[in-house]
Image: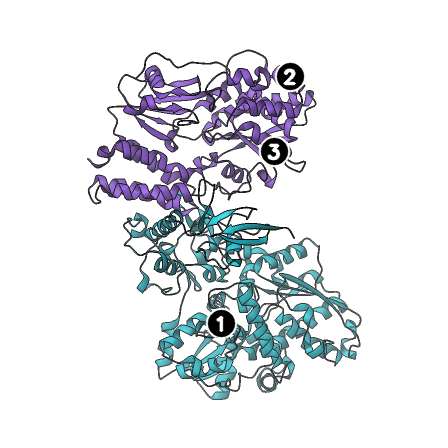
Chain colours: A cyan, B purple
Amino acid sequence: MKTVRLTIDKKVVEVQAGKTILDAARIAGIHIPTLCHHPDLCVAGNCRVCVVEQVGVRTLQASCAVPVADGMEIITNSAKVQQARRHILELLLSEHRSDCVNCYKNNHCELQDLAAKYIFTPVTLIPLPALQHYTIDSSSPSIIKDDSKCIRCQRCVRTCTQLQHVTALTVSHKGHEQKISTFMDKLLNDVVCTNCGQCVNRCPTGALTERNYIQEVWDALLDPNTHVVVQTAPAVRVALGEELGFDVGERVTGKMVSALKTLGFDSVLDTDFTADLTIMEEGTELLTRLKAVLTEKADAGTLLPMTTSCSPGWIKFIEHKFPDYLTNVSSCKSPQQMFGALAKTYYARKRKLNPAKIVSVSIMPCTAKKYEADRPEMRSSGFKDVDYVLTTRELARMIKMAGIDFMSLPDQEHDSLMGESSGAAVIFGATGGVMEAALRTAYELVTGREVPFANLDIKPVRGMEGVREANITIEGCLPEWSFLEGVELKLAVAHGLTNAWEVMQAVKQGKAEFHFIEVMACPGGCLGGGGQPIPTNSEIRLKRAQAIYEEDAGKHIRKSHENPEVLALYKDFLEAPMSHKSHELLHTYYIERHCN
Amino acid sequence: MTNTSTVRKTDLIFGRSLDTLTLLRNAMQRDKDGLIQELIDSGLRGRGGAGFPTGLKWKFAKGAPGNEKYIICNADEGEPGTFKDRVILEKAADKVFAGMGLCGWLTGATKGFIYLRNEYIWMRNHILAQMNDMNEAFRQMKLDFSIGLKMGSGAYVCGEETALIESMESKRGEPRNKPPFPAIAGYEDKPTVVNNVETWVYALLISYIGADVFAAYGTEQSTGSKLFSVSGDTPKPGVYELEMGMKLSDFVAEFGDGDTKAVQVGGASGFCVPRRKFDQVIIGFEGIPTGGSMMLFNSHRSMYHVLHNFLEFFMEESCGQCTPCRVGCQQLLLGIEAVKSKTKPAQYLDTLMEFTETMRLASKCGLGQSVGNAFNSIVNEFYEEMIY
């Protein structure tokens, strides 16, 4: 690899050709402030906060955008640079409604941080007139868009188009009217937005935030007449610690349970339980579809490939972008919604509670789950199955509000009835996890033997490659599954909607034939979800994934079909996977949506 | 003020010396490197305003690797006060296209485009006819080159070459980060030569008249002649081909109405020169360069209103992507209004001028970088008019 030598602040730096000045500075341990730059996104070079002086060049250079060259002399802190940097921040502050103490992102705002660092004299610029008549788009149950906080860094636009292939957010108008908009300036809830919240994860200010339900949950907790159950998604336990003083990648499952109990939830249960249940239903569904295609010569195209349905961002994406393939999506509800439906039926009956008095809360790494819970289909218990969805970030806020010393909490276990889970359920939180969990169960169901991978770790479907493909040949089937003998199952795993789009394009164009596709809307899967602690980058996501697999390895039950509470649920209530009762409570349908 | 020298008018572009196709055929008889050297020797610099040496640009593109290269004629003439490209396209479009063909032959590009500003859509049929004739001529000459037309959509910033390329690629017309420059990675990320309408014609002419004859016009740093769009308070507005390197005082003597208070050289992105500096200013690369716009203002004009108008223009025409330009333009306009209405003290003008320095240093493209030219020159030279 060709290297390039340059000097930054008189320090000689040697880096790979093709790196930017900013990369080189970071390698050399020299700090340059940035704002529009994000490690997950392509270079924009539009905020100009990162400008530096290059000796011999007339203008300052945006260090995030300019590639290094031999002999370059860079100065990151000259008077010129300092003045420009301060001016640029002052200009940004003049178009930003700096209502910091009232802002949801107060103390979590990159612009605020930069202002605190670089602005030490009062700003004299005139606040832009647009700040006097702004509107806040609160149409979406997941995301709130407040243009008066927007500084046009376009991270959200790059996220929405490049990372997610959604293009709900675009730039419209020019000059002083330039803004981040939607198709024809429609409300966020009326466009192709999948509510994935990846824009929220990358917005440096309070322009894009999750719609929070903190007050609603407090009200429920403090109401003596309600019974508040809470479920915790797999990916929350490996990220919540980041908001509360732990290092990235630390598992805080036990402390999370303790904190929820301290907050006053009447029962702390686990989405992992319904993740195991999902495997039972979805695994059975896959086998049913395979049987129909292989033995009954059913119309293969509408049944296979089957895609997963746990990720509500993916569901909304396919409803908008590939409506012809809705029959290919597993009819299983997501674990959150299965849990919700059971909380107000099975759980209520077992605990002898009036379901009308149950408030069902879920803690999710996800903003799309808020939208999912609001879907009109999601009322199969006769009530709203999941009343409120809180993100990992919102839970962290509540823990801080309650004055809980999270670090010193004892570890506690989830409550029983719907709190037991297997390692297979935990890995739902990482890309490839649903696939791996499904294989652990389906393979064993069909052959009577465990999947042929050491320690049940199906390594080919793990990892952070955007699209991963694997084949597994089924041999030695039990008699009732003989139609699968020798069949080579073709599997694909995609995370991030751009990757999902590519897989679906390949399917649509007949370039790829799969039996089963796992799609997670967010990079890295749920652990990189739109409700997770900010910041996010590939390193952080990798550490969270490692934590997830550690959690799985430490579980005494590793396979969904061995979860005793799931078995009890079938015995006492549902009868069997894909039974009539299951269909009523655990399965759903999808809706074709417009494409803009 | 001196009245001994006068402005020299020339007639290279519209003169009927030789048939365009003969010019092109003659040029294509020559050695390619020799011809590019001739262009370099002529000192011809881009006539759109930025003034990059044309021969060098062509040389880079010729040396750029790959077979797929593009030639683009920038006909997005949007600088306030410029209207000379319109006249060239009306009267001598064939020379423009032949110049592009010549560059195609020299650099190995086989496809060219003319990017025509939306406001010139009325010329579209005329241009298409001329273009088709020239494409046919290229075929007959066995020159593997053809030209297509792309219409702009009305944004000033698309005159900036990388924004123009983005617009041609059906994206938002926003300038790119540079490097890479278009000569290395332009349209469709392939090596691309972008030149102003006028530059193509001069390049073709130089291949015939030679570097020496061309460079005999003008000054050492500003060789040759160029078209000027003369407007404002003048008895004879219009397009004139004038020698480069003239003194502004000579220009005013020729075109002024006898009461010229200031001349805005180079359009809204150029500089304002007050009367007392007319005889110190050379119009050319050693002094104040211009893409052709020369706006004269007499003593009836309020320079505050002139500046206000320019700033309104920039505030709307900034693409909006980079902070210094998007917010800076708005702040400058709000600022002069606040000083005028006494809600800000006069010294606030000095603060604003500091901000124009940041805009110059830190904006992404020439638009934001040059807003301060007009702002600082007008505010400095007509300080009282800004306040009272």
Task: From the top left corner, tell me how far across and down residue B306 is, in percent.
Answer: 30, 31
Badge 3 crowding class, 10 Å Cα cut-off, few under 14, some 14 to 19, many 20 or more, is many
Task: From the top left corner, tell me how far across and down residue A502 is, in percent.
Answer: 63, 56
Which numbered marker is on residue B61? 3
- Seen from the viewer's position, the closer of residues A206 and B292 is B292
Task: From the top left corner, tell me how far across and down residue A97 is, in percent.
Answer: 32, 56
- Seen from the viewer's position, the closer of residues B192 and A561 is B192
Comparing marks 3 and 1, which lies closer to the viewer? Answer: 3
Q: Is residue A594 visible?
A: no
Q: Chain of mark 2?
A: B
Quarter of the image containing the N terminus of chain B? top left
Among the 4 quarters of the image, the one containing residue B213: top right
Task: From the top left corner, tell me how far across and down residue A104 is, in percent.
Answer: 36, 65
User: Mark 2 is on which residue type?
Assistant: Asn
Badge 2 crowding class, 10 Å Cα cut-off, few under 14, some 14 to 19, many 20 or more, is few
Q: Are marks 2 and 3 on the same chain?
A: yes
